[in-house]
Amino acid sequence: RALAQPREFLILDEPTNDLDRDGREALLAIVHSLRTGLLVISHDRELLRCMDDILELTPKRLSRFSGAFDAFWANRLEERARQLDALRVAKNQRRKTERAEQEKLARQQKRMQAGARSARSGGIPAIIAGGLTRQAEVTQGRLQVAAQRAVGEAAGGVDEAFAALEADPFLR
């Protein structure tokens, strides 16, 4: 009925869902011949290939793509690959940062142990050894704070990359 009455704009929501092959072909012929505005909500790729523009609604945004469906889909897959690559790079950076900060802390711990051994062996006066121990503990505390900050920033990069990642376009 909607197609039989003159309209300026027509909205079709999943129009091919309950159609057999002949019905789908008839609908495609009608879509090609329409001279009105048309909004089609569909997962039917054959029908979507008849559209001039593609609007994609995701949980994060509404985006518009001017062009054929196949070009839109290729673009969508490339964008997802870029997002996954950015996430992989961010995760690698986080791992490298964690490893580097752990190594810094381990080196500082070794220096503190060497200083403690030196103090125990009687090579330096007790008052100087105590001051050096306090200074080493302060340095270790600063390194721990810096390490937590660096790892937190790297983790923030992972969070940002994950937040930018669009949902997987394939249903599982």
Image (spheres, grey):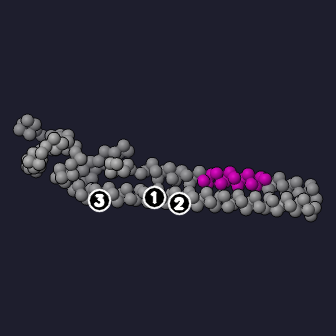
The 10 Å Cα crowd at callout 2, few under 14, some 14 to 19, many 20 or more, is: some
Residue topped by disc 3: 74
Residue depicted at x 26% and y 48%: 55
Crowd band around label 3 with a 10 angstrom C-alpha radius: few (<14), some (14–19), many (20+): few
Dot 1 corresponds to which residue? 86
| Residue found at the far left of this picture | 4
Check residue 70 in the rendering and tell me which mark sits there, or answer none. Answer: none
Res 49 quadrant in image: bottom left
- Which amino acid does the dot numbered 3 rest on? Ala
Q: Residue at x 56, y 57 (%)?
A: 94
Mark-to-mark CA distance, 2 and 1: 10 Å
Q: CA distance from mark 3 to mark 2?
A: 27 Å
Task: For the residues labelled 1 and 3, say whether their Cβ atoms are less than 8 Å apart.
Answer: no
Question: How packed is label 1: few (under 14 Cα within 10 Å), some, or many (20 or more)?
Answer: some
What's under tag 2, amino acid-wise?
Answer: Asn
Q: In what element is the residue under mark 2?
A: helix
* Residue 48 forms part of the magenta stretch: no
What residue span does the magenta drawing correspond to? 137-151
Mark drawn on residue 92: 2
The answer to whether 104 is drawn above or below residue 152 in the figure is below
Sequence-wise, which precedes: disc 1 or disc 3? 3
Which of the marked residues, 3 or 2, is nearer the chain's N terminus?
A: 3
* Residue 118 position within the rendered picture, expressed as x and y whole percent measured from the top left: 87, 62
* Visible residue check, residue 116: yes
Question: Looking at this view, is 169 or 141 the one in front?
Answer: 169
- The mark lying in front, picked from 2 and 1, is 2
Task: Give me the C-alpha separation between circle 1 and circle 3.
Answer: 18 Å
Q: Position of residue 159 (x, y in %)?
A: 50, 50
What is the secondary structure assignment of the residue under circle 1? Answer: helix
Between disc 2 and disc 1, whose residue precedes?
1
